[in-house]
Amino acid sequence: MEANSESPPVRLLDEINAETRIAILAPHPDDESLGTGGLIQIATSRGAQVHVVFVTDGDNNPWPQRFVERRWFIDAPERARWGARRRLEGQKALALLSQGQATSESLGLPDAGILALWEAQMPGPKPAIEKVFREWQPQIVVVPSEIDRHPDHQATHEYGLDAIRQIGLHCLVYSYCIHRPWSQKMLRRHVASDALTLSSHEQSQKLAAIQCHETQMALSAGRFSKFASPLERYTLVQIS
């Protein structure tokens, strides 16, 4: 649940130092760059440790794949190959953002299927997320927003919070929103409680990381490039 206006005025930037461990949940390769590309740069430049959990490989991504590969029919081997390509793009982008300092793991769960797992009360990514939280004890956990329109993002939010509750992790939780609700898009508004201000260099590096995702830039270059803006928005999440 997003924290309300009565929550303590905690600022994300003030919480990042050389002793900080940050865990980021990314439903797909590209979310790490679009949603948290500035955070990863700032955190690693300050000596903080960053670990990204890629929940899916983004393999169920037919329209960009059809466009890039000039094919119409896509079966399981083609999807697997596309997912492997997207996984490598995510690793390349993360290495660029962190100067090789951040670590990651890929769970390979079904793209566009995480909400179905959550609704069926299946374990999904939760055991792997709990393992990271239990062993690594991050002070900051970053999850997709619960109001994100993409169902994988909604479900990753729920799995992340559920894992925090399950192991009793004491941490700050922030969310990022990639696919804003239509009401926010129509009004050209961003509803967030906090933001990181990125320097021109950090914006440039974030754009370069986004461009590492060549499979996605093929059809979405204009939209994706806009994420390399001066502000990277976050919302403090209240764990209930």
Image: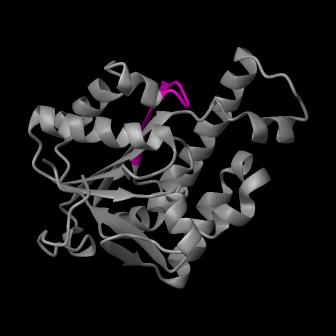
* Furthest residue in direction bottom, as rendered: 200
Q: Position of residue 165 (x, y in %)?
A: 14, 38
The quarter of the displayed image where residue 129 is located: top left
* Furthest residue in direction right, as rendered: 70
Which residue corresponds to the image point at 59% horizontal and 35% vertical from the top-left?
A: 58
| Residue 148 drawn above or below residue 114 | below
Left or right? Give the position of 179 relative to 82. left
Residue 75 visible at all: yes
Q: Position of residue 10 (x, y in %)?
A: 17, 72
Which residue corresponds to the image point at 73% horizontal and 65% vertical from the top-left?
A: 222
Which residue corresponds to the image point at 41% horizontal and 61% vertical from the top-left?
A: 40
Magenta stretch in the rendered image? 103-113
Q: Nearer the viewer, residue 109 or 205?
A: 109
Q: Position of residue 142 (x, y in %)?
A: 32, 53
Magenta-drawn stretch contains 109: yes
The quarter of the displayed image where residue 224 is located: bottom right
Left or right? Give the position of 34 relative to 16. right
Residue 99 visible at all: no
Magenta-drawn stretch contains 46: no
Q: Nearer the viewer, residue 58 or 90?
A: 58
Left or right? Give the position of 185 relative to 144. right
Q: Provide the major secondary structure of the magenta segment.
A: strand
User: Colour scheme in the image?
Assistant: one colour
Q: Nearer the viewer, residue 172 or 119?
A: 119
Q: Position of residue 184 (x, y in %)?
A: 50, 67
Which residue corresponds to the image point at 45% horizontal and 43% vertical from the top-left?
A: 153
Left or right? Give the position of 7 relative to 90. left
